[in-house]
Image: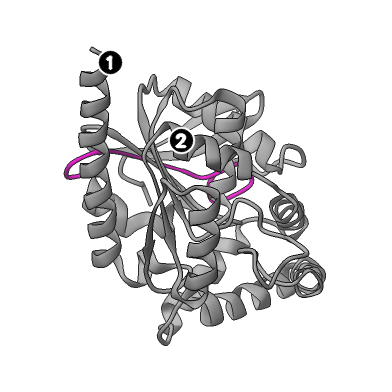
Amino acid sequence: MAVEGGRYIAVEPGVELFIQDVGQGEPLVLIPGWTFTTEVFAKQVEFFKQTNRVIVIDPRSQGRSSVTLHGNNYSTHGSDLAKVLDALELGKVTLAAWSFGALTAWEYIRQHGTDRVKSLITIDLSPKPLSLNHETDWVEGPLDDIAGAYLFATQDAEKQREFVKEYVTGVMFQGEVPADELTWLIEQSARTPHYIASNLFAAGMFSDYRAEAKLASESIPTLTIISEHWAETAAAFTKSLTPKTKVEVLGGHLSFWEHPEKFNEIVTRFLGGSKGEAEVAASSEG
């Protein structure tokens, strides 16, 4: 089935990324998380295309993009993002990145700075997903628990599907997940082979983008939307590391799918405020 605004962009010989590019106005670039696809942002695309140019990216080896045996890490995902922005000839953009997609956004900032980024929205991920100080730091979980999840989830395709099922029902949603949506979400993740999901899992967990998160918060308007289940710890960590970052708490890990109206309202409010801040800054420079 054809996707509105769907197209492919070559990021290197033999590797193409699928993107959806719809609407007009200031660019809003959406980046999905570990093994997921453009399609999880369907409710945001439909809403924001009325006011913005909305670009959604399938990272390499995810969704409709090329499956490759190399570059399945966030350093490469960050450089891929830069190539997409270049190909689309985009100026200032708002990056809105969910879960491990936030690592792609921070990696882009590590490589290219914030000159091209108007504002940054990260959805429910710490810039340092693992720490020995798991009781006080915002992390994905204790090291032994994450190691167990890694060893289970990446054994084979069946275990990957089982892991995603447990994660969707236990972490992504607050309420009961409709059976058809659960099946669909598992299928979205399964487009990434388990042996590549393994690379992305490890690369993400061992990332440390605290410096980039801090740089972004000092340079541009930033927003992080945090799940309710770890809100107290995550909010305290964020305010300590990046005190200028706006913090909102909403739902579970997939809040933008389960609570789209509230989520879209939060983002709309932030984008409006970011525009005002940018205009004030430009006026001051003038």
Above/below status of 77 relative to 259 = above
Q: Position of residue 100 (x, y in %)?
A: 58, 53
The earlier-in-sequence mark between 1 and 2 is 2
Colour scheme in the image?
one colour
Q: Quadrant of residue 21?
A: top left
Q: Would you call the spot at circle 1 few (<14 residues within 10 Å), some (14-19), or many (20 or more)?
A: few
For residue 105, say whether it is visible: no
Magenta region: 50-65
Q: Position of residue 226 (x, y in %)?
A: 45, 64
Query: Quick one: SS at disc 1?
Result: helix
Q: Residue at x 39, y 19 (%)?
A: 89
Q: Position of residue 193 (x, y in %)?
A: 70, 57
* Residue marked by disc 1: 285
Query: Quick one: SS at disc 2?
Result: helix
Image quarter (top left, top right, bottom left or bottom right) of the C terminus: top left
* Residue marked by disc 2: 218
